[in-house]
Image: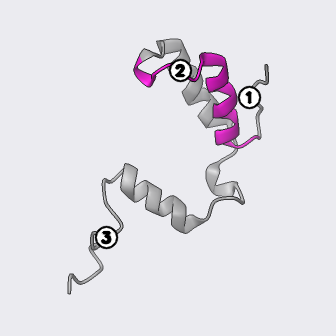
Amino acid sequence: MDNPNIGDDSLTNLTKLFTRFSWDKKLSDLTEEEIKATVIIMQFSKKVEEDEQYNKQELDRLLLKYVHGKDETEPTDNELPF
């Protein structure tokens, strides 16, 4: 079984971790220890903004969508609605 590695990107490391947990397990079924392990893996993995496969525009779009709840079609504070 492949283990997460320091310096690998977070998606690769999470794939390895979830393979250990079982892909059939729901997030709500994770134990406290498994949740802590997931957070630790994310923290020591290569930062996503340093990964060449992602661009800043895409990361900003995901941040707005999933953290701030804004859709691409919604005008920003700097945009006029007409």
- Give the colour scheme shown: one colour
Q: Is residue 61 left or right of residue 24?
A: left
Which residue was labeled with disc 2? 24
Mark in front: 3 vs 2:
2
Query: What range of the chain is rendered magenta?
Result: 8-28
The answer for how far apart the CA atoms under marks 3 and 2 are is 34 Å
Give, as a three-letter code, the residue at label 1: Pro
**Location of residue 6 with respect to 50 vertically, above or below:** above
Secondary structure, mark 1, is loop
> In the rendering, which numbered label is found on residue 73?
3
Q: Is residue 1 left or right of residue 60?
A: right
User: Residue at left 53%, top 20%?
Assistant: 24
Q: Which residue lies most toward the left here?
A: 82
Considering depth in this image, is 59 or 44 the residue closer to the camera?
A: 59
Question: At which x and y percent is residue 9?
Answer: 70, 43
Which residue was labeled with disc 1? 4
